[in-house]
Image: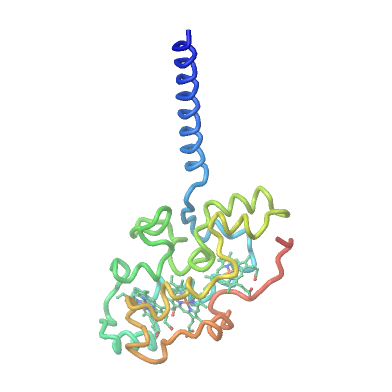
Amino acid sequence: MEGKVLRKYLVFLGVSIFCLATLATYNAVAAKAPEYVGVEGCNCHKTEYEEWSKSSHANAFNILLAAGRSRGDNKAMKDAGLDYKKDYDKDPKCLPCHTIGYGKPGGYKDEKSPEHLRGVGCEMCHGAGSEYRVLHKEKDETFTKAEAAAMGEVYPPTKEMCLECHDHPDSPFNSKVDEKYKFDFEEMVKLNKAWHKKYELMFKH
Ligand code: HEC
Ligand code: HEC
Ligand code: HEC
């Protein structure tokens, strides 16, 4: 008699543990890691998008090509010991800082990748967008900054985001090569011609 009760109890316990384990896996799947979506995925912000399109960050892929570089760029290439007559658009040493999410899920892979993954796009300053983009759409007026941050949004962009590229040891244009590449965040973040001006958002978050 007592053995039967115990067995029932053990079965119940087993089933409970199984359910909890399944739930835990489900939750892990539900909180997906954000992937890169490219600039076309962020162009609901029309004004920021249009200004960014004309900025040097948007042009950052083109300067990997000999034909896309200015004389100033060529001089900088020479000073950094690079061949200014050469195209570097397939060089894995250059792509991490001149494309969106190079080699990461959703990001730029190679020349067959969509064009809107070229250049230093929105997500390189604001975080990979697949998850917070959905939140923006579903709860346009009411989402909180904390919710967006939990889904990978970086707002406002931090110094750390910029330093992934600027004055980075892997960059041929860091302050070891020339003092002028020293990155002073407080000053640089004011030069918003390099991306877009500051606009009021439609809703408070
Ligand atoms: C770790 C990031 C990083 C890597 C890797 C990188 N770059 Fe850049 N590149 C930058 C940054 C940041 C700038 C802007 C520097 C500035 O103006 O302060 C830049 C600027 C440039 C410029 C313009 C320089 C000027 O002063 O006019 C050229 C051309 C360029 N990169 C080509 C390349 C090439 C070619 C490679 C590969 C051999 C490469 N980059 C690899 C981050 C990087
Ligand atoms: C080089 C970094 C950088 C890139 C690239 C960039 N932004 Fe921003 N963005 C910023 C900074 C910095 C702010 C914060 C402005 C402030 O608070 O002073 C900002 C603010 C914003 C805001 C808040 C409202 C506003 O206008 O200030 C939106 C929306 C936005 N960015 C969208 C975009 C979109 C869309 C793109 C791409 C088309 C983009 N950003 C590309 C740096 C960047
Ligand atoms: C993914 C790499 C990357 C990130 C992240 C990045 N930048 Fe840049 N930035 C570049 C490259 C490459 C250039 C050069 C583009 C060109 O010359 O066409 C550049 C150019 C600039 C320029 C123009 C420099 C000049 O002399 O005209 C400013 C200003 C700047 N970045 C500021 C920032 C700030 C502030 C942040 C962070 C909020 C940031 N960048 C994030 C790669 C990056």
Q: Position of residue 74 (x, y in %)?
A: 34, 85
118, 92: nearer the viewer: 92
Q: Position of residue 78 (x, y in %)?
A: 29, 87
Q: Position of residue 196 (x, y in %)?
A: 59, 74
Say which residue appears at 72% left-offset and 53% top-offset: 142
- 74 is higher (above) or lower (below) than 163: below
Tell me: 34 left or right of 190: left
Say which residue appears at 40% left-offset and 72% top-offset: 62
Tell me: 183 left or right of 66: right
Say which residue appears at 46% left-offset and 53% top-offset: 35
Residue 170 occupies quadrant:
bottom left
Residue 151 occupies quadrant:
bottom right
Q: Residue furthest bottom?
A: 179
175, 73: nearer the viewer: 175
The mark total stands at: 0
Location of the C terminus by quadrant is bottom right
- 25 is higher (above) or lower (below) than 136: above
Q: How is the image coloured?
A: rainbow
